[in-house]
Amino acid sequence: LLFGSMIALCQLVTFYSLRVTTVALSNMCNTASVLIPTLFGIIVFKENFTLGTGIGIVLFFAAAYLISSKNNATTEQKPFTFKTFLACLGVFFSNGLGSVSMQLFARYSVGVSESAFMFYSYVFTSAILLVFVSVLLIQAKRKLALSSDASIKQTQTPEQMQKPRLLV
């Protein structure tokens, strides 16, 4: 349940972040999310912090700096706003916490197949996304109906607007 919710949240936040940031920045935040389960394992599960882990973290930050530097003229530059910051944090934490929930499942599940876990997680994710998309479609349909009502009123003459309408 937790993993499926995190996948759905990650997908929604990623789609939103693509609207307010560049693809490179959104992808960088998504990739950076592997730091969360790595640090979670080191802090909570007392896993070893190896030289390779340290080098990987340093190389990640170096790559992030190179990707986001303003000297890179090949990418489009969007202004970095508070919305951009929140979108990046959302992508980072939703994907990272989803990976942590997988880590917890792998460590504490007994007698449950990983295939069943993944299947039910993705079914739950699909259900959440289906509900979300349905709500968006209903809202869009209502906005369309309201805008068409407004355009009809704009095309009516003042005499037509003053005539009382019978409600049946």
Image (cartoon, grey):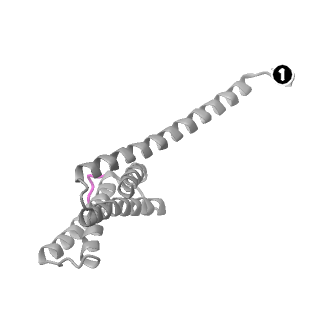
Q: Which residue is drawn at 86% across and 21% down?
A: 163
Most common secondary structure along the magenta stretch: loop
Q: Which residue is drawn at 20% across and 73% down?
A: 58
**Which residue occupies the foreground of this view, 101 or 135?**
101
Magenta stretch contains residue 89? no
Is 44 left, or right, of 136 in this rendering? left
Quarter residue 5 falls in: bottom left
Q: Which residue is drawn at 27% across and 67% down?
A: 37
Q: Residue at x 32, y 62 (%)?
A: 101
Q: In which quarter of the image is the C terminus?
A: top right
Is 158 left, or right, of 18 in this rendering? right
Mark yes or no: residue 123 visible. yes
Is 148 left, or right, of 119 in this rendering? right
Instruction: Return the x and y of residue 109 as percentages of the image width and height.
Output: 27, 62
Q: Is residue 27 above or below residue 156?
A: below
Instruction: Return the x and y of residue 87 as percentages of the image width and height.
Output: 42, 58
Q: Label 1 sits on what residue type? A: Arg
Magenta stretch contains residue 74? yes
**Which residue occupies the foreground of this view, 109 or 8?**
109
Q: What stretch is highlighted in magenta?
A: 71-75
Quarter residue 143 falls in: top right
Instruction: Return the x and y of residue 102 as percentages of the image width and height.
Output: 28, 60
Would you name the residue on which mark 1 appears? 165
Mark yes or no: residue 71 visible. no
Report how many numbered discs are placed on residues in the image: 1
Quarter residue 78 falls in: bottom left
Categorize mark 1 by other alpha carbons within 10 Å: few (<14), some (14-19), many (20+).
few
Q: In this view, does 54 lie above or below 89?
A: below
